[in-house]
Image: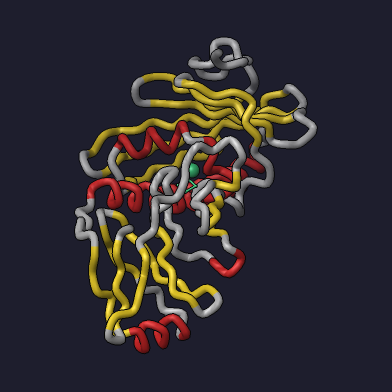
Amino acid sequence: MSANQPNAKAFNPNALNMVQVATYERLILAPLVRVWENVLDWEHLPYLHDSSFDYVELDVGGPWGWRTWSNAEHTDHVELTLASEDSYVARSYQAGQQVSEIWTTLTDEGDATQVQVEFFIPNVEEDKTEKLGQMMTHLYTRLWDEDEAMMQQRHKRLHEHRDDRLEKSLGDEASIRSKLADRDAITFQLKRREYQITEVDGRLIAISTICPHLMGPLIATDASNGLVRCPWHGYQFDINSGECVFPEHADCTLPAAPELHVSNGHIIARMA
Ligand code: FES
Ligand SMILES: [Fe+2]
């Protein structure tokens, strides 16, 4: 499988009357390896970027890039193609007609990545160029803000040292319950995993804070319905069984949680 677009790695392969409406440059504070992961990761688009994407459904993807439907009727789509070692191109189509072409070049800057994005739209009248350019720049500023935060958090999770003890005291039960009542997040580490303490029907339990998919945050979720959700790709997990309940095809489960019990007024966490 590869791109549908013939000559997808070339500029303007449909020979349209392309107008460059803007260029966006930015130093992203995440290494190049995280940025390439993000480029190939179509699945985060409707979740991490939920304010920018209404509908994203995978048609096909692979090492070459991916193609997603932009509506349920499958008349519109986006195709992203890796064009060279340091560039990729995203093209949008409506009813088979190409409506944009966006080229991105990535430069390795060690712990950071320099990004240059060039926006091309066909048949733009001269007096509309500036406004369209501003719209694209605003959109991409928000997208890269969201991507940068995700990449930084994933990178930190991949490289941080976590406590490998199998048992520890988490502190006084009364003060822990009082903090939870104030909606303070209480996290702790055990066996190189991280957990948060949550109260469900008066019972204190531990729930993983790190999503088993790609290490997104599970911390800001409401456990009262028995589910936790990750904002990066929308995966949902049953906190009792650990099973992934959405999406159906996902092959990942929550790590086993430690048991919490009370000893002399203190909460003790222990791996079973
Ligand atoms: S990291 Fe992908 S859903 Fe959590
Ligand atoms: Fe993104």
In the picture as drawn, the residue positioned furthest to the right comes out as: 73
In the picture provided, is 157 more to the left or to the right than 127? left
Q: Quadrant of residue 208?
A: bottom left
Locate the C terminus by quadrant: bottom left
Q: Does residue 202 sit above or below 214 in this rendering?
A: below
Q: Is residue 123 visible?
A: no
Q: Is residue 141 visible?
A: yes
- What coloring was used for the rendering? secondary structure
Q: Residue at x 32, y 39 (%)?
A: 114
Q: Does residue 71 sit above or below 265 in this rendering?
A: above
Q: Residue at x 59, y 47 (%)?
A: 245
Q: Residue at x 31, y 35 (%)?
A: 33
Q: Does residue 88 sit above or below 159 in this rendering?
A: above
The percent position of residue 91, horizontal first and vertical second, equals: 59, 28
Q: Nearer the viewer, residue 130 or 187?
A: 187
Q: Residue at x 35, y 25 (%)?
A: 86
Q: Nearer the viewer, residue 132 or 38?
A: 38
The percent position of residue 219, horizontal first and vertical second, equals: 44, 63
